[in-house]
């Protein structure tokens, strides 16, 4: 099932109209049960004479209608309306639609989930409080703030803004859509809040890089007597990591040890990340060793933590241990390993791990992997090898790649290759003044004063 830009645009416009519906669609109705079948209508929907093969007694089973709606959505995704909704509306109620919306949301078919919601509106099936959490989940994944605003207005018109689950879902959608201000407004307007609401607001702050505000919200949560959950702690530890707030992070670690919270894989990984970014390698290792369950992301954070704190050999040992314990590394794993090699100047190890990405683990290098290798080779004075890697890479070199080569040229006094790198930079970013400053410094280093005046 493929999406088209035209279909996505049409569904977006339908959602944006929800806040101000046309008069013909303002009167919505709801049905608590599937009505008795109409042979004529059923024939239009299924092509069969009647529902006899699909009914229990005189009523159609909901499972069959759910499958029918699912087939219709897959077939009619590119149309403004799905015929099954237009012709078989008496067989479809809000609970069935909610089930289909949740199914598509769980399957990550978010535009299809939203398409079902617009069809409900068009045929007059009134949503209930259970409809919006799944719809808002899909909106948070497609991340369009205008649609989120439209659904917010629709929720308010229907009187569901006081429902704690709907409001929490709306708050989360705003946070993912990078609208911290709107998320805070929703939170402040909530008559009732639970730990999910507080967690969503903290997540909103961290997603929008408002880390001090996240800690302030956590303190407000404590003052209100709401017990924090593991999700709360993960969000606050992320804020502490970015702020380098080691004291606050240690307090949270102590709180976890003294409370009923279990050191699960998410909480343990967040602690490792916090200690790594605060430069406390010993406590980072202690948390890792105390974890009973780990995943690839846990290993990635450990390896990156060693690398950023100048423990290159420890990072490589962690990688080898990870592979021995049957964890399959991913692109982020190798990025951490190559960064560690770069920080420590481990050229041979860097070459070996870079080659093993494709040869052993079948991982295609990202532009960031190439950047690490060019930086590693350039700093080591292997400028010809670095340039050969750039010219033979399958991706188009970005400015960071050329700046890495230029850095090595300046260190080792290769003005000719440095000028070549600068020209490439100017071709990519002609309007970036920093590139001209780098060019003038390169000429000054070679005492080419006349060229600096050009």
Image (cartoon, rainbow, N blue to C red):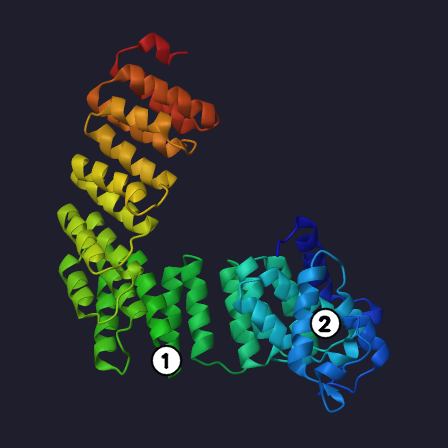
Residue drawn at (45%, 76%) of the image? 196
The residue that mark 2 highlights is 120
Residue drawn at (22%, 36%) of the image? 351
Under circle 2, the secondary element is helix
Q: Which mark is residue 382?
A: none
Residue 95 seen by the camera: no
Residue drawn at (24%, 46%) of the image? 337
Residue 223 located left or right of residue 272: right
Task: Give the farthest residue toward the bottom.
Answer: 57
Crowd rating for badge 2 (residues with CA inside 10 Å; few <14, some 14–19, many 20+): many
Instruction: Indicate which disc, 2 or 1, sits on the residue closer to the N terminus.
Output: 2
Locate the N terminus and report the quarter of the image it occupies: bottom right
Question: Cβ–Cβ below 8 Å for labels 2 and 1?
Answer: no
Marks 2/1: CA distance? Answer: 42 Å
Picture coordinates of residue 61, whole percent (x, y)? 68, 84
The residue that mark 1 highlights is 223
In the rendered image, the vertical position of residue 154 relative to residue 416, given as above or below: below
Locate the C terminus and report the quarter of the image it occupies: top left
Residue 316 located left or right of residue 70: left
Picture coordinates of residue 294, whole percent (x, y)? 26, 66
Residue 341 seen by the camera: yes
Q: Nearer the viewer, residue 338 or 77?
A: 77
Under circle 1, the secondary element is helix
Picture coordinates of residue 414, whole percent (x, y)? 25, 18
Picture coordinates of residue 121, whole percent (x, y)? 74, 71
């Amino acid at each position: 099932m493929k999406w088209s830009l035209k279909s996505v645009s049409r569904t977006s416009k339908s959602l944006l109209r929800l806040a101000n519906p046309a008069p013909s669609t303002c009167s919505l109705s709801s049905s608590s049960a599937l009505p008795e079948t109409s042979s004529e209508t059923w024939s239009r929907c299924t092509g069969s004479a009647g529902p006899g093969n699909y009914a229990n007694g005189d009523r159609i089973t909901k499972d069959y209608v759910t499958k029918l709606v699912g087939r219709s959505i897959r077939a009619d995704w590119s149309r403004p309306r799905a015929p099954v909704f237009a012709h078989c509306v008496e067989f479809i109620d809000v609970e069935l639609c909610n089930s289909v919306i949740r199914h598509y949301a769980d399957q990550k078919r978010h535009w299809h989930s939203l398409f079902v919601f617009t069809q409900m509106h068009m045929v007059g099936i009134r949503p209930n409080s259970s409809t919006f959490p799944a719809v808002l989940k899909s909106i948070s994944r497609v991340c369009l703030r205008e649609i989120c605003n439209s659904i917010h207005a629709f929720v308010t018109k229907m009187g569901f803004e006081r429902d704690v689950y709907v409001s929490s879902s709306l708050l989360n959608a705003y946070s993912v859509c990078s609208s911290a201000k709107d998320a805070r407004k929703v939170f402040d307007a909530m008559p009732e809040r639970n730990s999910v609401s507080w967690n969503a607001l903290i997540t909103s702050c961290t997603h929008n890089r408002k880390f001090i505000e996240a800690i302030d919200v956590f303190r407000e949560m404590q003052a209100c007597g709401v017990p924090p959950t593991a999700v709360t702690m993960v969000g606050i530890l992320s804020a502490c990591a970015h702020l380098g707030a080691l004291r606050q992070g240690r307090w949270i670690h102590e709180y976890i040890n003294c409370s009923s919270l279990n050191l699960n894989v998410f909480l343990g990984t967040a602690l490792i990340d916090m200690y790594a970014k605060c430069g406390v390698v010993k406590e980072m290792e202690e948390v890792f060793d105390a974890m009973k369950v780990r995943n690839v992301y846990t290993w990635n954070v450990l390896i990156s933590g060693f690398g950023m704190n100048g423990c290159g050999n420890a990072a490589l040992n962690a990688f080898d241990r990870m592979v021995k314990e049957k964890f399959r590394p991913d692109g982020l794993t190798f990025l951490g390993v190559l960064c560690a090699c770069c920080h420590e100047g481990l050229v041979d190890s860097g070459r070996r791990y870079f080659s093993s990405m494709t040869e052993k683990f079948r991982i295609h290098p990202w532009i960031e992997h190439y950047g690490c290798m060019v930086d590693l080779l350039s700093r080591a004075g292997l400028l010809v090898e670095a340039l050969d890697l750039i010219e033979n890479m399958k991706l188009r070199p970005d400015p960071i790649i050329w700046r890495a080569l230029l850095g090595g040229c300046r260190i080792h006094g290769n003005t000719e290759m440095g000028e070549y790198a600068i020209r490439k930079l100017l071709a990519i970013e002609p309007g970036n003044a920093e590139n001209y400053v780098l060019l003038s410094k390169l000429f000054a280093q070679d005492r080419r004063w006349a060229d600096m005046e050009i």
